[in-house]
Amino acid sequence: MLVVALLVVGSGVAGYRVLLSPGSLWVRWAQAAFPADITMISFGPYPSAQDLRSFKKEGGRYVVSLLDPRLPYEKELLEREETAAKKDGLIFRDFPMASIFDQQLFPDYPNEEQRAVDFLKHLDAPAYVHCYLGKHRVIHVRDALRRSGVPASYWTASGSETEYWDLVNRLADAREEFIRGNFVKVLGILEPIRAEDVDVAALRGWSNYRLGLYSRAVENFQAGLKLDPRNIRNLEGLGFCYLQQGNPVMAQRNFSLALEQNSKEKEALVGQGLAFLTLGNKAEAGRMFREVLAIDPGNKEVAGYLKKAEAE
């Protein structure tokens, strides 16, 4: 590939200048396109000054870069972009994740990815997230956001612009009420939504679960899994419903599907441990609970489960 060659000779004057011109013909053909529709979280390549102005005009507020100043050409691009963003009144943040063709260059890459996720989880206005080409680092951040429970609706436009923002705003309000424990209020906020949405299904399901309405929660989680059979939140929710209904074998199937995607998924590990405990397999239950405590040492609830698994 031509871009590979450019990176290889990037220390040369000509190659370096090309790297500093992501809008040039030599680089633009290899980049992802700048998003046509602005969503709560939009992903793409290094933006031009015109891209930033268009983003601001559409209601955007945050520009989140994944470029790394330890790479000389990215350092120059960062400085240029930060100046342009501030000129347009945008809030600029950088989480340096150096990589070349998806090969991580520095050991702090995962930590910076998590910092980006933590920032994006609490947005109050649209953000544009980018790397150099818009094809690698942004995908890792998007997948990490999905694993952390951020609704895919945040970056997937559907319906009219009015319908989309109504969905996003209702999801944001509902998530806040869920955290406060106002589960009836969550269901009320989501009630007007008629569009099929995997994250709405999960939030409805978990609210009904917390209210003890397990049969209704099962229906919600199953509706979500019809849209996305591998959605972790709905798989876990259905698994916990099966545990409540006295069906640990079916629960294990759902937790296993979640763990296939992320072996460190805490909720799935806890659920799998409880399923093993119900089936009398204390050794496997204990192993699951110890894995959770290795990730979250202060989890008193799981520590209590472990004591039960280790009891004679």
Image: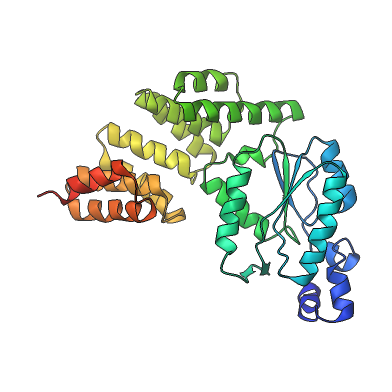
306 left or right, relative to 14:
left
Give above or below for 54 relative to 259: above
Tell how many labels: 0
Residue 279 seen: no
Residue depicted at x 30% and y 43%: 300
> Where residue 273 appears, x then y in whole percent?
28, 48
Horizontal and vertical percent position of residue 186: 51, 23
For the point 46% across and 54% down, the residue is: 261
Identify the image's colour scheme: rainbow, by chain, secondary structure or one colour: rainbow
Residue placed furthest toward the left? 312
Q: Nearer the viewer, residue 61 or 159?
A: 61
Residue 118 locus on image (x, y percent): 58, 46
Within the image, what quadrant is residue 78 found in? Answer: bottom right
Q: Is residue 278 above or below residue 141?
A: above
Residue 305 at what x, y percent from top left?
24, 44
| Residue for point 89% across, 78% down | 14
- Image quadrant containing the N terminus: bottom right
Of residues 56 and 215, the one drawn nearer to the viewer in this rendering: 56
Q: Nearer the viewer, residue 296 or 264?
A: 296
Can residue 89 be spotted in the picture?
yes
